[in-house]
Image (cartoon, coloured by chain):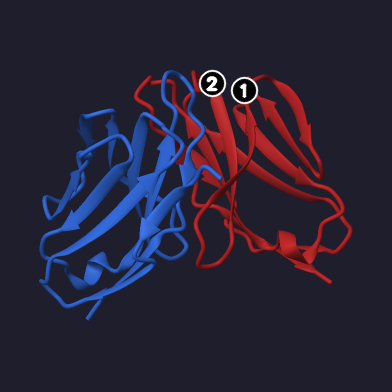
Amino acid sequence: QKEVEQNSGPLSVPEGAIASLNCTYSDRVSQSFFWYRQYSGKSPELIMSIYSNGDKEDGRFTAQLNKASQYVSLLIRDSQPSDSATYLCAVEPNFGNEKLTFGTGTRLTIIP
Amino acid sequence: DAMVIQNPRYQVTQFGKPVTLSCSQTLNHNVMYWYQQKSSQAPKLLFHYYDKDFNNEADTPDNFQSRRPNTSFCFLDIRSPGLGDAAMYLCATSKGQGVYEQYFGPGTRLTVT
């Protein structure tokens, strides 16, 4: 079983709609969760961190965490063509060794 | 602006010819990481340093070595690059001490001919 799972996509969303990206993780004791955006040929860019159950909002982005169900999601409101990228979910497995486990990413395409 | 810098951005090397990639950071972070990323795959951790303490991943080939001469700099040495080592190499840093956000440099695209 993969430690961090994401649907690889591609996920196509019309411009202006809400894009919903999901991630599940296997280690129940994980405490820290991150979303990275990666444009084609570029490096990952941290866009959201979440540590507690519930929602965390930052501009058009909302991260949602449900530790009981072991999933974390990212909502992008008012999607723009510039949001077209691969979104990587990363989880800190609480081993105290400063490492993150990354999913393989979901490729998002915003259709104008 | 505080940042993570990688040089070169693009590197072409010949099969078997040693190559060194460099990373520097102005964030004064304790932890520095080297990842390998191939197309459509997750970044794969090769090793990381917490201060001067080196941590190698079990499946990192011996062909890959690293040096961290000081807090700001870290190097990735590929002793005998093979065609399978062509990839994007990413350097990242984190503060450590229970703070896990990692910040990536722009990456070095390695081509092996």
| Residue visible at 51% across and 62% down in the picture | A42
Extreme-bottom residue of the structure: B113
Q: Which mark is residue A51?
A: 1
In the rendered view, tell whether residue A22 sits above or below residue A33: below
Q: Are marks 1 and 2 on the same chain?
A: yes
Q: Chain of mark 2?
A: A
Between the C-alphas of marks 1 and 2, the distance is 6 Å
Q: Position of residue B11 (x, y in %)?
A: 30, 71
Drawn colour of chain B? blue
Would residue A1 be seen by someone viewing this image from the given angle?
no
Instruction: Identify whether A8 is placed above or below A40.
Output: above
Closer to us: B77 or A56: B77
Could you tell whether B70 is left or right of A10 in the image?
left
Can you tell which mark lies on residue A31?
2
In this rendered view, identify the residue nearer to me: A68 or A86: A86
Which chain did the renderer colour red?
A: A
